[in-house]
Structures are given as C-alpha cells and as structure tokens.
Image (spheres, coloured by chain):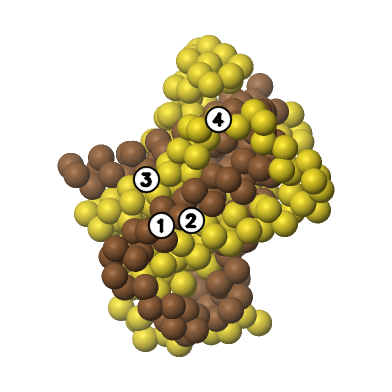
Amino acid sequence: MRGFVFALLGGAFITLQGVANSRISQDIGTWQTATITQFAGFLTALIILMFAGNGNWQRLRKVNPLYLIGGTFGAIVVFGNVTAIHFIGVTLTVSAMLISQLGMTVMIDGNGWFGINKQKMKLPQVIGITMMIAGVIVLGL
Amino acid sequence: MVLGLICAIIAGTLVSLQNIFNSKVNEQAGSWMTTTLVLGLGSLASFILGLFFEGGQLFDLQQMKWWYWISGLLGIGVITGIVQGIRYLGPTFAISIVLTSQLGFAVLLDSLGWMGLEKVPFTLKQLFGVVLILGGVIVFKWSEGRKKEAIDLPARNEKKLEVS
C-alpha cells in the first residue's frame, strides 16, 4: 500500500510539474523556467545529499563519461514538455511522451545499445504500443 | 498540433535515454548524488541554451513569483516517489502505476482547466482514449516484467560494454 501511494504521487508530480512549468513559462519564458526549476531541485538534492552523508564524488569517476552528461538532456526535456503543453494540452502531451519513451526503450533493447542485453521485440510489446498509439489518435481526433 | 506532438516525442525520447544513463550513474553513485548531478547539469544546460537563444533577455525576471521555485521541488517528490515505489513493489508494477497516475492526472488537470490550461471537457472519447492507452501500458509492462524475471540471473554476470 505504501509503495502504491509513493508510485501514485511520483506520477502525479511529473504531470503537475509539467503543468506548473508551462504556467511559469508564460510569465518568465521557457529557458528561464527550465533553468530556475532545475536549479531549485539541484540545491535541494545537494542539501539532502550532504545530510545523507554519502557525498563521495570520487565514485563518479567509475562511470563512463557519456552517461554523466545525461542530465543536460533535462534542458530539452523541460523545453519540449512545456512547448507541447502550450500547443496540445496536458493529456496529449503526456500520452505522446509515454509512447515515444516506451518506443525508444524497445529500440534500445532491440539493438542492445548502451550495454543493454539485446532483446527482440515481443508480440505483447507490439500490441501494447499499438493500443497506446490508437488511444492517442482517439484523444487527438 | 504537429509541432506540439514533435516536441512531446523528442522530450519522451530523451527521457528514456536519460533513464538509462541515470541508472548507470545510480549504480555507482547512489540516488541523491545522481539527482544532484542530473538537475545541476540540466539547469546549467538550460542556462547556456537560454543565453544562446535569448541573450541578455534571459535575465529579465520581472514577472517572477516566489512559488515558481517550488515547481523545482516537485522534481524531488518525483524521484522519492519512484525510488520508494520501486523499493516496495519492484520496477514493473511501480512504473506501471507511475505511468497510469501520470496520464490520470493529465486528464484531470485538462478537464479542470487548472493553471491557465485550456479546459478540455471529459467526454466518452477521452475515456475511450485513456482506457486504450492504459491497456497498452499494462500489456507492455506485464510482458516486460515476465521477460526480466526470466533473464535476471545471467544478466548479472554480463560485462558492461562501451558504446560502439
């Protein structure tokens, strides 16, 4: 039950954040919104990290440098999310993001990119993504 | 409409890449260090892109209100929710709930027209679309969960590969 509530809140906050960012960007601009909101999150995470007391930055050296720059994508993610909400509303934005997310995952699995074990796309995955795309078309009609 | 969809698709694609990259960092550095790094770099990249596209206008923050800072804190809630959800329920079930909740709240906020959103009334059409998408998420995640259980053991011995 506790796990359910956590997961539910996690999903709700993702959507809320998109809507709040989209609202904020109307006042101060989209890049400003992306900079400020992520900076606020950065400061908070940094404080938690200090209190949690395991801030050993040396451990980052063991990570392939390519993976360390994943965070920079956040700029385009926030920009794309906010712009999409302006144009097509929250429901369609979230739906399209979910589909491209899962589609990309299938492609990465299928090709074994980034050291992931290569896995062929299975029938249930094809059915699942087809259903999702059909749903987005229904919403967009 | 098309422009909006393209933006959403690019964002979704990058989210899935980011999830993989972040989980690799997470393996070594733990979730709070990963979060700190990811949000710090995201903020920095936004700042640089903003300077590039808007120049000095980037610093024009007259309309700024104090609660705008809070939106960034929602990100902390997102990470806590997902990490704890996975801890209690395992990734397949937890992520299915996260995705469902994301879409459910999207429909709710659209139909309430909150925070300057254009109100989209909840109709049978919306219901049908959302049910189709959620059905798809469940079918997709359910098959993935079974696949993961089956390959979990051999996968652990796999060497980490460099990107080719």
Circles 2 and 1, Cβ within 8 Å, touching? The answer is: yes
Q: Farthest residue in the left direction?
A: A1
Q: CA distance from mark 3 to mark 1?
A: 11 Å
Rate crowding at label 2 as few (under 14), some (14 to 19) or many (20 or more) other CA atoms within 10 Å: many
Residue type indicated by callout 4:
Lys
Q: What residue appears at the point 50 percent right and 39 percent down from the top-left corner?
A: B69
The foreground one among B64 and A24 is B64
Q: What residue appears at the point 46 percent right and 62 percent down from the top-left corner?
A: B36
Q: Mark 2 highlights which residue?
A: A42
Q: CA distance from mark 3 to mark 2?
A: 13 Å
- The chain letter under disc 2 is A
Q: Which mark is residue A45?
A: 1
- The chain letter under disc 3 is B
Residue type indicated by callout 3:
Gly
Circles 1 and 4, Cβ within 8 Å, touching? The answer is: no
Q: CA distance from mark 1 to mark 4?
A: 22 Å
Q: Mark 4 highlights which residue?
A: B65
> Of circles 3 and 1, which is in front?
1
Q: Which chain is yellow?
A: B
Q: What residue appears at the point 66 percent right and 82 percent down from the top-left corner?
A: B164
